[in-house]
Amino acid sequence: MPGATRIEWTESSWNPVTGCTKVSEGCRNCYAERLAQRLCRIGLSAYRNGFEVTLHPDVLPVPLSWKKPRYIFVNSMSDLFHEHVPSGFILDVFEVMKRAEWHTFQVLTKRPDRLIELDSSLEWAPNIWMGVTVESSEHLCRLDCLRRTGAKVRFVSFEPLLGHITDADLHGIDWAIVGGESGSGARRMEAEWALALRDACICEGVPFFFKQWGGSRRKAAGRLLDGRIWDEMPRGDRWIGCS
C-alpha cells in the first residue's frame, strides 16, 4: 500500500516535511533521525539534506490520490510545527487534510507553543486529530496547550515513556498511546509506568493504545501489557490494523 508504515497505531505516513531538531529528552534517540541519515547515505533524493528541515511541496497532494479511507500519520519524519516550517506551508497541509475528508489524519508535535500561536488560523476539520508527545511529567504542560486548540479529536503519545507519570490530567483528551523507546541505546520503560497510565485511562474513559515495550529488539519484546493487547481507538472504534 502506498505510504504504508509499520507504526502500530496508524496505517500510512505522509511527509510533506522531513527533518527536525531536538527539543527535549525524548528526542535523544530519535528514530526519524537515524532513518533519515540512512536514507541520505543510500542516495534517496527526498533525504538529500539528511535530517535538516526540508519542505516537499510536491508531496502535498499525495493523500488526495489515495481513494480508500485510511489513518495517516502526518510527518512521521518531522514536526509540522517546527519553527523552520513557514506558517503558510502549515496552512497548505491543513487545506489538503480538509479536502481529503475520507481519511483520518494524525498530527503529533512537541512544539505546543507554535501550535497555540497558529491555532486561530487553522481550520480544524473533524478528520484532523491533533496530538502532543509527553515523555515525562516535566512536559505535561503540552497537554494544557493541546486542550486550548480547536481540534475536534485530541490525543497524547507517551512515547518514549521515560518515567512514572502519576499526575497526568486526561480531561479533554480523546486517546492515549504509550510506548517504550526503541533502537540502539534505548532507555528502559518500567511496567508500572505503563500500567499507571493504563489505569488512568480506564478511570477517565480514555481509549488506551499500548504500542510497544521498545528496546533494541522491539518486535521480540512484543506488545502484551498485563496479559493482553491494548488497541483501543477514539470514538469507541476498535483498531483492526493493516500490518
Image: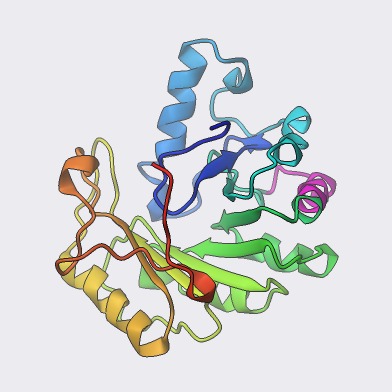
Q: Is residue 31 magenta?
A: no
Residue 242 at what x, y percent from top left? Answer: 43, 45
Q: How is the image coloured?
A: rainbow
* In this view, 243 is above or below 187: above
Q: Is residue 26 left or right of residue 154?
A: left
* In this view, 97 is above or below 4: below
Residue 240 at what x, y percent from top left? Answer: 41, 56
> Residue 110 lies in what quarter of the image?
bottom right
Residue 4 at what x, y percent from top left? Answer: 51, 36
Q: Residue furthest bottom?
A: 203
In magenta, the rendered stretch is 83-96
Observer-nearest residue: 79 or 219?
A: 219
> Which residue is pictured at 34% across the width and 55% down the height?
160
> Which residue is pictured at 49% across the width and 27% down the height?
36
Q: Is residue 163 left or right of residue 151?
A: left
* In this view, 242 is above or below 227: above
Q: Residue furthest front?
A: 68
Residue 159 at what x, y percent from top left? Answer: 37, 57
> Which residue is pictured at 79% across the width and 56% down the height?
98
Main secondary structure found in the magenta portion: helix
